[in-house]
Amino acid sequence: MISIIMPTYNRAYIIERAIQSVIQQTCKDWELIIVDDASDDHTKDVVMKYLSYNIQYYVNSTNKGANLSRNIGVQYSKGEYLTFLDSDNYWPKERLELQLKIMKEHCNKRCFFYGKVKILDKKNEQTVPHKNLTWNELKKIELYDNVVDMNTIMISKSLFLESGGFDNEMPRLQDWEFVLRLLYVFQIEGIGCESCLSFNEIQENSIGRDNSKFEKAIFILYKKYMCKYMKTEDLFHFLYRFMYNPKFEKDQIQRIISKMALKNPDLLFVTLKQLQEKENETYQNYDMLVS
């Protein structure tokens, strides 16, 4: 019933944990398709130990990226439903069982299913999203921030193919782009689960740490979705978040904001209006002090 797609690249030191979390699932009606993106470590040796289970292993001839590797995995899949597991993530053993139960309750709807993810980064830990969201809440929040982790999604293969799969041009944030496309372009409802469905342990060489790829990806998202579905005032607040984000260098922030402002000139007027209001507030405070 369920095809699990796992792209991997040089994760020999950690992929075994991800595989074990699939094998230990209380729901046993699954196949695991691992697409090795031309690893040059001993990933193959680790995976070969598990081929007696319902696991298929494919190796790309050259490095093609996570997006294309996931799409390749889907081509080989036979299940009615698709889920995705990165090789540096792992699942609680009830993950598939919990989502199948929710899925059966909404079997007549055009929808995808997702849950909470626990993100572990050295000493920091956070759960996303913090609460279960309605479809309208998800649509609004998702424009500002990606709260749907790909490792928690379950979707029918037919809906996945209808929506076009993953965008191979996205250098990062492919899960964010995919979810926005489901919600806004195809009007597919997102149904959340109260439980934590995945654990994401951030790696030192994770693509999530590559800010140059983030810069390219966020502007693609901006052109495709934020410009179309956000009000100008909301776009301003979206930009404002980057101005004070400690993860990015000053020149990166300037490039992101200038590109977005050029794409939507109205932002310049909103920015000037905000600055004027702030300046007026400063003068009013000063007048109160000296009067």
Image (tube, rainbow, N blue to C red):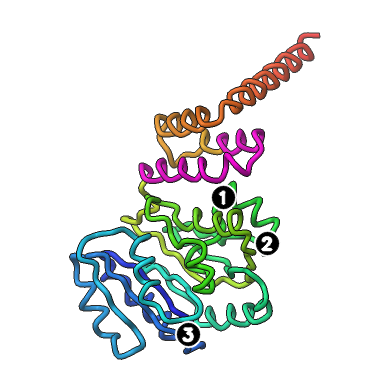
In which quarter of the view is residue 174 placed?
Answer: bottom left
Percent across and percent down for residue 171 are: 37, 50
6 sits left or right of 103 in the view: left
Q: Is residue 220 magenta?
A: yes
Q: Residue at 63% across / 44% down in the picture?
A: 229
* Residue in the image at 57% along x and 42% along y: 226
- Farthest residue toward the front? 162
Residue lying furthest right: 291
Q: Which residue appears at 46% of the width and 40% of the height?
A: 219
Residue at the disc numbered 1: 145
The x and y percentages for residue 110 are: 63, 69
Residue 84 placement: quadrant: bottom left
Circle 1 — which element?
loop
Q: Quadrant of residue 287?
A: top right
Q: Earlier in the sequence, mark 1 or mark 2?
A: 2
Percent coordinates x, y for residue 273 in the rendering = 67, 22
Callout 2 secondary element = loop
| Residue 25, disc | 3
Q: Is residue 256 above or below residue 207?
A: above
First to last magenta residue range: 211-240
Does residue 236 appear left or right of residue 158 in this picture?
right
Q: Which residue is mark 2?
A: 133
Asked whether, in this view, residue 98 is left or right of residue 45, the answer is right
Tell me what residue is drawn at x 51 percent, y 31 percent.
263
